[in-house]
């Protein structure tokens, strides 16, 4: 079993994640968070919100920031005016390329189909398979053997040419064996596919009533820029944060929750003076990278990838991705957790003037339709900002750190998952599965066990449970051997287990066991709430 298979199985067994609508066979690309998962993901989102908004001190300058700044929040609707997506560019440009298989009737994302050239019986084909990195080689071999009508013992007669590559690198489609096909050349040429989910608003149901489920939360912030400015006393530089659902009709959702069709984003749009925008970009890029480090993703599996200039949008002067080496990826590959983009004044101007394009001189201008009118008209609302001190009027520049709540949760889960050895109640070493989650993210901060269900122990444990529950989520368990109770909490990621034993009845002390070091200390019952509070605070 690969480590990813073990993580997926633990998630189901312990109630972190379930496939959506599982009793009906599931729905591809949709996931439900169970009792432990919902707490974990809420904790990730809450930590982000606290660090960005509620705990931010606008009177002080954080380390590395160009100046002090203000932060506020927003919660806007998932369905917005369709013109929002026309001006933002999503209506025209938010697509992936897909290929259809005429034989199997399946659809694939063009760049995600991977395969390898292989030769046998005088024929050379590009054999493909959709498989996790660890199983790719075996899956390709199996498909090639089947195609050439060979047995496993004949595997050596297959001559492989070059490493596995994406279908996007292949031109000779007539020699491609599609992932679910028996014959060659069944794939269509790549076609564009818009990723926005369409819906109908109102009872009439005509095309004019078509609207979209938002593919990002960011646009809700841009279109509310003036509302926030006019209703609160914020002044530039300031940021608006939003956490919420986004929807993308991904062609091939895959890798557990990594690429889903419904997911949550945690986005900040930070508005600043154009002159300082580069320094703010660098500040947010570094600060967001440090956030993942601080919460348990190790430097050797995390990287900050600055995009090359030719990779980034023409209006931007910097984009970086924070990436993590997810266990389902081939060694050396990383998956995106968060993108930090310098978006200049592109978004505010688009919603003011209309959809923008780059002209021959490299400047952003309103795109015109064949009728000589703007292709997608803007709101006409003034999105500029007047500095009350200098009286300068300008359209602010925007830095956008855009994180995925589900991807962050998955990365913290993958990193936390470990199998090690721990002693049972007789001191014999036994293998255990443990989630070494950061205490801030752990679904339960502590578990309370009476050693036995008698001799006054449950009464003391229940009173302590009640006191701790006022402060944070804790778990009470009096069933089974204490060793087994520890194991269940280790798998749930609970950082501390508190045991009430015979001595507790005598001297009003309890033991606290640390999930990671397995160290046990004995402290006074009256000090437990303060001790756990101090240990789990972010
Ligand atoms: N407003 C900018 C924006 O949306 P993005 O790179 O498309 O940028 C930001 O998305 C983050 O949202 C990604 O880094 C990722 O964490 C998350 N995300 C995007 N698509 C996703 C999907 N299909 N499933 C899960 N998370 C996704």
Image: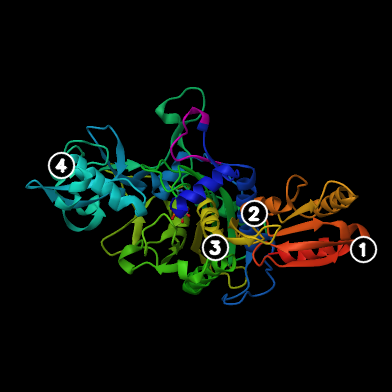
Circle 3: element type: strand
Ligand 1 under 8 Å from disc 3 Cβ: no
Mark 2 vs mark 3: in front: 2
Residue 532 in sight here: yes
Task: Name the residue that disc number 1 marks.
Answer: 507
Task: Name the residue that disc number 2 marks.
Answer: 43
Q: Residue at x 49, y 28 (%)?
A: 24
Query: On the picture, is 223 further left or further right than 449?
Result: left
Task: Name the residue that disc number 3 marks.
Answer: 270
Using the numbered discs, state the Cα–Cα distance from disc 4 to disc 2 in whole angstroms. Answer: 52 Å
Q: Work out whether mark 4 precedes mark 2 in sequence or the reverse, and give the earlier one.
A: 2
Q: Residues within 10 Å of mark 2 (few under 14, many from 20)?
A: some
Query: On the picture, is 231 further left or further right than 122?
Result: right
Residue 225 to residue 362: above or below: above
Circle 4: element type: loop
Toward the left, the furthest residue is 122
Circles 1 and 3, Cβ within 8 Å, touching? The answer is no
At which x and y percent is residue 233? 67, 61
Magenta region: which residues?
Answer: 23-32
Q: Work out whether mark 1 precedes mark 3 in sequence or the reverse, and give the earlier one.
A: 3
Residue 513 to residue 469: above or below: below
Query: On the picture, is 137 further left or further right than 271?
Result: left
Circles 2 and 3, Cβ within 8 Å, touching? The answer is no
At which x and y percent is residue 185? 16, 39
Disc on res. 148: 4
Circle 1: element type: helix
Circles 4 and 3, Cβ within 8 Å, touching? The answer is no
Q: Residues within 10 Å of mark 4 (few under 14, many from 20)?
A: some
Circles 4 and 2, Cβ within 8 Å, touching? The answer is no
Using the numbered discs, state the Cα–Cα distance from disc 2 to disc 1 in whole angstroms. Answer: 36 Å
């Amino acid at each position: 079993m690969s480590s990813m298979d073990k993580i997926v199985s633990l998630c189901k067994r312990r109630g972190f994640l379930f496939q959506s609508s599982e009793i009906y066979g599931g729905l591809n690309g949709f996931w439900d968070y169970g009792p432990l998962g919902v707490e974990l993901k809420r904790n990730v989102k809450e930590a982000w919100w606290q660090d960005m908004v509620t705990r931010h001190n606008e009177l002080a300058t954080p380390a590395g920031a160009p100046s002090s700044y203000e932060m506020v929040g927003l919660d806007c609707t998932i369905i917005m005016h369709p013109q929002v997506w026309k001006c933002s560019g999503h209506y025209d440009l938010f697509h992936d390329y897909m290929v259809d298989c005429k034989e199997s009737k399946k659809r694939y994302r063009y760049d995600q189909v991977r395969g390898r050239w292989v030769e046998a019986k005088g024929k050379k084909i590009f054999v493909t398979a959709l498989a996790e990195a660890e199983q790719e080689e075996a899956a390709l071999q199996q498909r090639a053997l089947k195609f050439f009508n060979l047995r496993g013992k004949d595997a050596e007669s297959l001559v492989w040419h070059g490493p596995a590559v994406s279908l996007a690198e292949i031109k000779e489609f007539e020699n491609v064996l599609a992932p679910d096909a028996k014959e060659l050349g069944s794939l269509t040429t790549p076609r564009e596919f818009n990723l926005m989910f369409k819906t109908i608003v109102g009872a009439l149901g005509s095309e004019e009533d078509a609207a979209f489920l938002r593919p990002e939360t960011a646009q809700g912030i841009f279109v509310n820029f003036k509302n926030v400015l006019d209703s609160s006393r914020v002044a530039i530089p300031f940021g608006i944060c939003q956490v919420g659902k986004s929807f993308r009709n991904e062609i091939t959702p895959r890798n557990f929750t990594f690429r889903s069709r419904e997911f949550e984003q945690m986005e900040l749009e930070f508005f600043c003076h154009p002159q300082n925008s580069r320094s703010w970009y660098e500040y947010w890029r570094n600060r967001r990278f440090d956030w993942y480090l601080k919460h348990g993703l190790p430097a050797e599996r995390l990287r900050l990838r600055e995009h090359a200039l030719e990779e980034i949008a023409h209006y931007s002067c910097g984009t970086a991705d924070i990436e993590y080496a997810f266990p389902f990826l081939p060694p050396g590959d990383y998956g995106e957790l968060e993108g930090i983009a310098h978006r200049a004044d592109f978004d505010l101007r688009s919603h003011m003037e209309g959809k923008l394009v780059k002209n021959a001189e490299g400047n952003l201008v309103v795109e015109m339709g064949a009728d000589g009118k703007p292709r997608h008209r803007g709101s006409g609302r003034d999105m500029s900002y007047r500095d009350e001190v200098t009286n300068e009027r300008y359209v602010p520049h925007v830095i956008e750190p855009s994180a995925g709540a589900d991807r962050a949760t998955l990365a913290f889960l993958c990193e936390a998952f470990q199998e090690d050895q721990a002693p049972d109640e007789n001191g014999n070493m036994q293998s255990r599965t443990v989630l070494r989650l950061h205490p801030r993210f752990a679904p339960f901060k502590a578990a309370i066990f009476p050693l036995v269900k008698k001799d006054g122990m449950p009464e003391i444990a229940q009173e302590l449970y009640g006191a701790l529950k006022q402060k944070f989520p804790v778990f009470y368990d009096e069933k089974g051997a204490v060793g087994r109770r520890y194991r269940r909490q280790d798998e749930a990621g609970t950082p501390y287990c508190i045991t009430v034993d015979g001595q507790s009845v005598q001297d009003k002390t309890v033991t606290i066991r640390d999930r990671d070091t397995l160290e046990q200390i004995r402290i006074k019952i009256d000090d437990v709430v303060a001790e756990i509070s101090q240990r789990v605070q972010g």
